[in-house]
Amino acid sequence: MKISRWIDTEFDNVECPHLKVDGTPESTTIFPGEEYQHVSWIHPLIASVFDAARERWDSPILVTSGIRCQAYQEVLRKKGLRTAEVSPHVYGVALDIQSQRAVDRGIDPTLLVHDSKRIAELIHKVDPGIRIFCARYAFKFVHMDAAYLIPDPLPDGRPKPESWKAGVRDFP
Ligand SMILES: [Zn+2]
């Protein structure tokens, strides 16, 4: 199923594995008119910024993670993966992405780092408000999100993290 021009559930891992098993998409009212329609819902802003960056890059970009439910987020944390307790992925405003050509070469580390930096720069050019993290992941992938769109407090009552501001990024 096509999520946007360049995001397709057939190739991209945008769906939460938990929600897929469960089969019952969560619904949310944090974005009025944009309630989750399916387990692979991605906020239209993030999808359109991804598409614009993809067109400028002119080579396939793989989405390795999109929406996650809170339960799946806990699974990742227990696996010891460096992921936040509260994650923008849970609200459908985040994507993790990788250069497809670097993955195709059996994950070529040098090319992966090179491409991650270039893709991150492109995303920043398309929309400087998008939060971008890749240095903290050793440029193995690029995390992009629009966490600043999430209201404070979070839907579960917790305060919105300080760093969920437009334009925050960890590369020059
Ligand atoms: Zn991420």
Image (cartoon, rainbow, N blue to C red):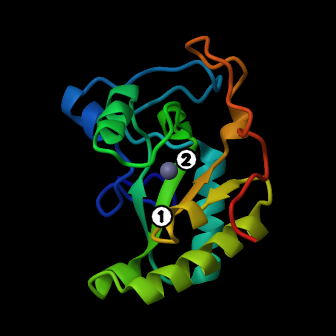
Residue matched to label 2: 94
Q: Which amino acid lies under the numbered mark 2 shown in the image of this protein?
A: Ala
Residue 45 lies, with reference to residue 38, above or below; the image says below
SS under mark 1: strand
CA gap, disc 1 and disc 2: 10 Å
Q: For the C terminus, which image quadrant?
A: bottom right
SS under mark 2: strand
- What residue sits 55% from the left and 47% below the top? 94
Residue 28 lies, with reference to residue 100, above or below; the image says above
* Image location of residue 113, percent across then percent down: 51, 80
* Label placed on residue 122: none
- What residue sits 78% from the left and 46% below the top? 166
- What residue sits 67% from the left and 45% below the top? 146
Residue matched to label 1: 97
**Label 2 neighbourhood size at 10 Å, few (<14), some (14-19), many (20+)?**
many
Specify whether tag 2 is near ligand 1 (CB below 8 Å). yes
